[in-house]
Image (spheres, coloured by chain):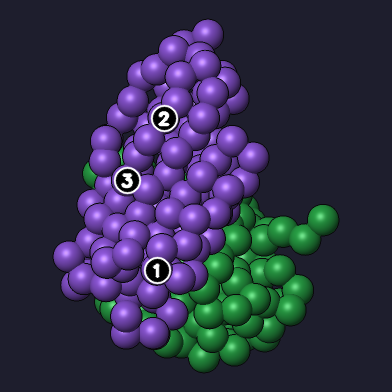
Amino acid sequence: GQQLNQSPQSMFIQEGEDVSMNCTSSSIFNTWLWYKQDPGEGPVLLIALYKAGELTSNGRLTAQFGITRKDSFLNISASIPSDVGIYFCAGHGSSNTGKLIFGQGTTLQVKP
Amino acid sequence: DARVTQTPRHKVTEMGQEVTMRCQPILGHNTVFWYRQTMMQGLELLAYFRNRAPLDDSGMPKDRFSAEMPDATLATLKIQPSEPRDSAVYFCASGGGPYEAFFGQGTRLTVV
């Protein structure tokens, strides 16, 4: 079945640094979504991407839908301690069944 | 403040017992997902519904798991009989269209 490969698996950075993480697939995806999960909570939708090449921002977060439709990246600029959490990419494959698949997540830790 | 509501938040049960988890999707949303999250497997899609009809439950062990939507305001996930390997956090998510999903806070299940 379709799978999403997310990297890096974890990151430990200094407050104020920029962060970049990405997600790749061996098959085409029609949508890419980026979520953040805090401990003890459900994932929260950050950014949704619907078209190849689309670049969308949400505050300090920027995400892009890759031209090949097989990848996406998420950037966080000027990280702050509350950015700590697990970031997930998710997407809908080309079969248009509505099935939403998740990557394995990137754990972000920010040192004040 | 619209949100997905899951009950119970925590459940501890003995092996062999029946477990029922409930989800109230966001009013007006017509797509409902059930996910299971573990450290080893990440977020696994168990089943999802559109307009109360099951579209895909291929991720769910059929012999012990069942998912239903008795009406538009309630989705249930049942495990009978439960086993220790079912211990995980179970998330429900709902979406107003075919692409986005908004998560509840999850039910943390422990089977002893």
> In screen coordinates, is B29 left or right of B64?
right
| Label 2 element class | strand
Residue B2: percent from the left, percent from the top?
77, 61
Which chain hosts label 2? A
Q: Report how far apart the C-alphas of labels 3 and 2 lie in the structure.
A: 10 Å
Residue A108: percent from the left, percent from the top?
41, 28
Q: Is residue A46 above or below residue A26?
A: above
Which residue, given by chain and number where applicable, does mark 1 sit on? A52
- Residues at marks 3 and 2 on the same chain: yes
Mark toward the start of the polypeptide (1 vs 3):
3
Which residue, given by chain and number where applicable, does mark 3 sit on? A22
- For disc 1, the neighbor class at 10 Å (few under 14, some 14 to 19, many from 20) is some
Residue B6 found in image quarter: bottom right
Question: Which chain corresponds to the colour green?
Answer: B
Which residue, given by chain and number where applicable, does mark 2 sit on? A19
Mark toward the start of the polypeptide (1 vs 2):
2
Question: Which residue shows up at 21% across the image and 71% down it?
Answer: A27
Residue found at the far top of this picture? A112
- Give whichever of A18, A40 is nearer the camera: A18
Question: Which residue shows up at 47% across the image and 50% down it?
Answer: A63
